[in-house]
Image: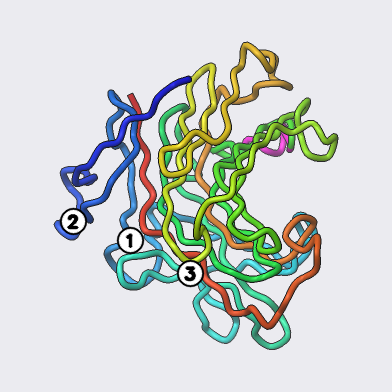
Amino acid sequence: MKKILLIAAIACLPMASAQCKRAKSYAPKGYELVWQDEFNEGTEPDAAKWTHVVMRQGMVNHELQNYVNHLTPDGTPVTEIKDGTLRINCFKENDKVYSGRLNGNARTGWQYGYFEARIKLPKGKGTWPAFWMMPAANRMPNNGWPRCGEIDIMEEVGFTPNEVSSSIHTQDYNHTKGTHKTHAMTIKKAEGEFHVYGLLWTDDEIITYVDGKEQLHLEKSVLGDSHDQWPFHYPFHIILNLAWGGDWGGQEGVNESALPVTMEVDYVRVYQK
């Protein structure tokens, strides 16, 4: 079993703001910080780092939210920077549910590394927050899902409070076939308190962590090295989103009285050798 080392340091690039937080990171020894957002400046996500996904209700997984570009038609933010954190807000407005989905470094992504975010999850039946990765540079049209690959670092659904899971999806291993590779664990107060979710991705391994504890551990030598088995050989980008309802989030119905809800992100950091 590969061990992950705890580093207590100021996790800031040389050019970063002096406001950078002192926080614990679980980055492995030998990995250096190459990209980050500490969410300390401004009132909305940095457009140089993050892209809003615009997507109407039902386009993916029969989800009930409408993803918009920062503001609803009435001008309410679905994403905002406040008190040193990113807030992804999900709420009902004029009989529609709105929320936010952000792609990080979407055009370039990263091939291999350690990816980490400190996140506080919302409460409520119908919530479906996620921290995950998909191929960068728009590889999807000629390499559609699930063949393109997907790495889910952290997902949680509100009808199973505090149970967080990690999964991968490929052509041979995906949830539509019931063959996806996944692991779940229940942690104390995932809803309402911050926890650190991490991914170590190398040429031949994918390992996810919760507060430094191993969650999912997969090896290419076990799953197979064909593209349909292990498509994790090109850059992927980060995604943060808060869905409402859908095939999984709404599996046991939704409770609209829970709205509004917020997924709060303290930081996102990327390390590479």
Location of residue 252 by image quarter: bottom right
Tell which residue pokes out farthest to the right in this image. 177
Residue underneath mark 1: 39
Name the kind of residue labelled 2 in the image: Ser
Classify residue 26 as left or right of residue 110. left
Work out which quarter of the rendered image holds the C terminus and state it. top left
Does residue 241 lie above or below 257 as drawn? above
Which residue is painted at 58% across and 69% down in the image?
A: 123
**Residue situated in front as seen by the camera: 143 or 91:** 91
Location of residue 271 by image quarter: top left
Mark 2 touching mark 3, by CB under 8 A? no
**Residue situated in front as seen by the camera: 165 or 107:** 165
Which residue is painted at 27% across and 63% down in the image?
A: 40
**Which range is magenta?**
139-145
Spatial separation of the CA atoms under disc 1 and disc 2: 10 Å
Residue underneath mark 2: 17
Classify residue 190 as left or right of residue 173. left
Q: Mark 2 or mark 1, which is nearer the start of the sequence?
A: 2
Please tell me whether mark 3 sits on a helix, a strand or a loop: strand
Residue underneath mark 3: 79
